[in-house]
Image (spheres, rainbow, N blue to C red):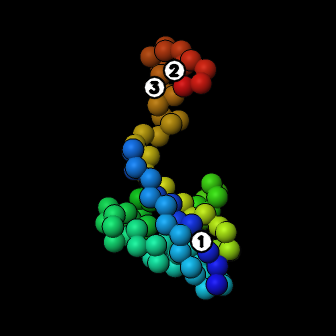
Amino acid sequence: MSTIEVVYSLPGQQFVVQVEVPDGALVQDAIERSGLLTEHPEMDLAGLNKVGIWNKLAKLDSVVRDGDRVEIYRPLIADPKEVRRQRAEEGKVMKKGG
């Protein structure tokens, strides 16, 4: 058995659930065991929400290992490249650090 941490956050809230999964379990298995899918029906793992292991994008059929942190990412509100392009067109200067 492996202990996996599954994480999902909303603005102002973070949900961290530790689950036990059998060796060789997949990312999908860990997420399902966490119960976060039933608590947050807005999640769409097939489309909108991407997932990762320790800040690296992963597929739902990736194998998890003991101690992994599975992260469920919210969809981006705006494409960062598009926002920068629009600022450049408007002549706005971005300040360093945000």
| Residue in the image at 51% along x and 20% along y | 88
Q: Is residue 17 left or right of residue 43?
A: right
Quadrant hosting residue 65: bottom right
Q: Do the residues labelled 3 and 2 touch (CB within 8 Å)?
A: yes
Would residue 60 be visible to someone looking at this image? no
Give the secondary structure at mark 2: helix
Task: Kindly identify which residue carries mark 3.
Answer: 86
- Near mark 2 (Cα within 10 A), the count class, few <14, some 14-19 or many ≥20, is few
| Residue in the image at 53% along x and 15% along y | 93
| Residue in the image at 46% along x and 73% along y | 34
Q: Position of residue 67 (x, y in %)?
A: 67, 69
Q: Do the residues labelled 3 and 1 touch (CB within 8 Å)?
A: no
Question: Of residues 44 and 35, which is closer to you in this image?
Answer: 35
Q: Position of residue 8 (x, y in %)?
A: 46, 58
Task: Kindly identify which residue carries mark 2.
Answer: 88
Looking at the rendered structure, the kind of residue marked 3 is: Gln
Task: Kindly identify which residue carries mark 1.
Answer: 4
Question: Of residues 44 and 25, which is closer to you in this image?
Answer: 25
